[in-house]
Image (cartoon, rainbow, N blue to C red):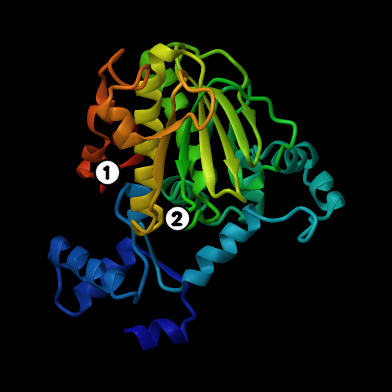
Amino acid sequence: MRFYLKEKKKTWLSHSYVTQLANTIGIRDASEIDMALELFHDRGMLFHLTQTEKLKRIVVLHPQWLIDGFCKIIRDKDLHRFSQNEFEVAGLKNDLQMAFKNALPTPEYIEYLLKSHNVKFFVDFMRRVMLLSEWKFMTESYFLVPSLLADNSDAQYAGLKCVFDFSDDFLPLGVFERLICLCACYKYQQQATQHVRISGIPKLSGNFISMDITPELKVQLLLKRDAKSITLFVHDSEQASRTLFIVNSMLRKINHDAMNSGLRWQILLEDSNLKENNLVIYEQAKEKELAPWFGVSRSKIDDLAELDSEKTKNVSLEDFILSL
């Protein structure tokens, strides 16, 4: 069957077509077909995700097809330039500018790039791997693609510090970008489920974000590539423990889903009572119930080790966000 598909130069198949092929060789049980696809996926013979119905509909035979699709959306505007005239003729000049200036491509822009082929699959796939998120905080609908964001050397930040230190290992590209996606997803889902418009225009760049993810909770995150660290700044001390819990949960989700659980980091918490060397290792801070991280509001932070549980694994992004 693989030889036949190779001769036909198929890059992907619909799940319904795979079912038809299976039926021709006597496999008619849907669960058996899904088990076979799972086996082939695990062995690297094909690529098949089942987290959503849109993803389940496509069976990818050649990963390069996925990469080519991603590269049409995530690209360096200077190295891989688009023809301005082409997009102006297509009526997408402003869409092109929004994509590269603000990292906010429109659905029409993405459809044009992908030539309207399997757009829903690509969008859902990129959402699932945290390369894209909904951005419905403006009058028009956009997608946020953090990999298109440029760094901001003039970012302004302040507050109590929590440092996620990756210096003993490594901090690869894509972690901070996915963290931005999850923050945007959290903000959107909170707004949708609570029917409360969350105020504040998010400040986004490749190395810094400032975002009100709930009416009471502001997240400021600074990426320091050379130091291999991500710093969380907390403004409201009453929200310190909860903010830490949410951001650390998001990092664990990224680690499991996108980094094959290969990331290691240490948490350092600021002790405002110390003037020098005021960053304390998480375990020591917990032992002495360092406020405001502990003791003031003994919320979910009491044991971050519990986040290794299934709460951050093998669940959809929507269910994960709801669990926080």
Q: Position of residue 183 (x, y in %)?
A: 47, 32
- Kindly identify which numbered label has been placed on residue 203: none
Which quarter of the figure has residue 207?
top right
In the picture shown, does residue 205 fall above or below 139? below
Query: Label 2: few (<14), some or many (≥20) within 10 Å?
Result: few
Nearer-N-terminus badge (1/2):
2
Helix or strand or loop: what does disc 2 sit on? loop
Q: Position of residue 125 (x, y in %)?
A: 44, 51
> Residue at point 19% right, 67% down?
33
> Residue at point 20% right, 72% down?
23
Q: How many marks?
A: 2
What quarter of the picture does the C terminus occupy?
top left
User: Separation of disc 1 and disc 2 at Cα?
Assistant: 29 Å
> Residue at point 35% right, 44% down?
253
Q: Which residue is mark 2?
A: 168
Q: What amino acid is at disc 1? A: Val
What quarter of the picture does the N terminus occupy?
bottom left
Query: Label 1: few (<14), some or many (≥20) within 10 Å?
Result: some
Q: Is residue 64 left or right of residue 109?
A: left
Viewer-closest of 187 and 108: 187
Q: What amino acid is at disc 2? A: Asp
Q: Which residue is mark 1?
A: 315
Q: Is residue 249 left or right of residue 219?
A: left
In the picture shown, does residue 236 fall above or below 157? above
The answer to whether any part of residue 229 appears in the image is yes
Viewer-closest of 204 and 305: 305
Which quarter of the figure has residue 309?
top left
Viewer-closest of 102 and 295: 295
